Image: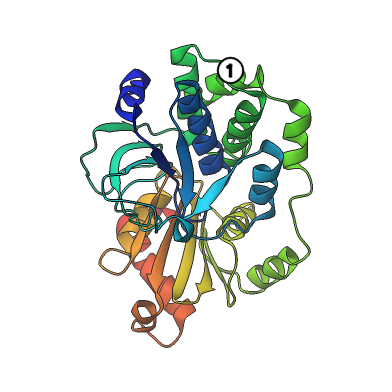
Amino acid sequence: MREPEKLIALCKEHKIYIQTHNFPDPDAIGAAFGLQQLLEHYGIQSVICHEGQIDKLSSVKMLDRCGIQMHDYASLKAELQEEDRILLVDCQKGNGNTTDFVGDEFAVIDHHPTYKTVEYAYADLTITGSCCSVIADYYRILGVEPSVQAATAMLYGLRIDTLQLSRGVTAFDVEIYGYLFRYASSQLLTELESNNMEFSDLKAYGTAIDHIRVYGKVAFSYLEFDCPDALIAVLSDFILALDEVEVTVLYAHRKNGYKFSVRSERADVPAGTLIHTAFDGLGSGGGHATMAGGFLERETLEKLGSDVFAATQQLFMKVLEKDYSAAL
């Protein structure tokens, strides 16, 4: 339930740590930054923190141009105490992409489906296209005007997570888009959206294309090297753009396992449920109906067969054939 006054009251007289999911994307960054500035309006100091690298050019540029400071968990371990208050944004406790930090996760604001029930002092779990939309609505409810930087960051995060209002978007997102547009800088937004591909990204595109295998309307591909989470997601969208494809599964190697990205444009094949079911008892996975992610430890997947790519296909096809035969 959206009660920003209650959240503000719970944060009063505490130093707040705003935690995003690991490897934060523009929606997580924009939502966390918007919330940080809103709390500051009420005299509440907060620190935005995360686990993992911010290694996509678009996110790095966003931090620089909007003046956003984020701190890696490793740099905070020495100061965090069990009683410190952690506010989860664009993630939930117990998810595979959310590291359990030292501290009390007293509140959560997220727009993803819930796969594990956790009790919080404050919870706002709204299924919508962007977490930035939820935070922006707090400004609207409280009658606080967002700064140009916060409004632009939230508008950018909204645009990226909904693929320019074409994926997973709701009427609420569109309404908030109009609200943020009044306060955002069109020039800054253009800068954030321009020239976000690096030369090294071309290798990933080429490899993903070479490895595509299509079964009915389902496409699989992989990268045999490490790759930023954000780029894996972009490649999944790229493959989904093929006319013959309606569901994509792509993974990339990590040092200790495999990072997965799933996309679906079929209403009868929710991506989050698909990967959550496929990885049940094996690893972590979940997300929206249109886009989702997950992770499997190397030893877990390799136990399923010497051919990791074939084992991956078998995991997902088993679920698709059993529960979603219309997708084949």
Work out whether residue 129 can be spotted: no
Question: Where is residue 197 drawn, in percent x and y?
Answer: 74, 55
Question: Where is residue 106 drawn, in percent x and y?
Answer: 28, 39
In the foreground, 43 or 328: 43
In the foreground, 166 or 321: 166
Up the image or down, 192 lies above or below 311; here it is: above
Q: Residue furthest bottom?
A: 306
Mark 1, residues whose alpha carbon is within 10 Å: few (<14), some, or many (≥20)? some
Q: Amino acid at mark 1?
A: Tyr
Seen at 61% across and 26% down, the residue is 151
> Mark 1 falls on what kind of element?
helix
Question: Where is residue 229 drawn, in percent x and y?
Answer: 55, 59
Up the image or down, 14 lies above or below 86; here it is: above
Question: Where is residue 207 drawn, in percent x and y?
Answer: 67, 72
The residue labelled by disc 1 is 179
In the foreground, 159 or 61: 61
Work out whether residue 65 can be spotted: yes
**Displayed quadrant of residue 154:** top right
215 with respect to 97 (left or right): right
Seen at 41% across and 78% down, the residue is 298
Up the image or down, 182 lies above or below 202; here it is: above
Q: How is the image coloured?
A: rainbow
Seen at 46% across and 57% down, the residue is 51
Quadrant including the C terminus: bottom left
**Displayed quadrant of residue 188:** top right
134 with respect to 210 (left or right): left
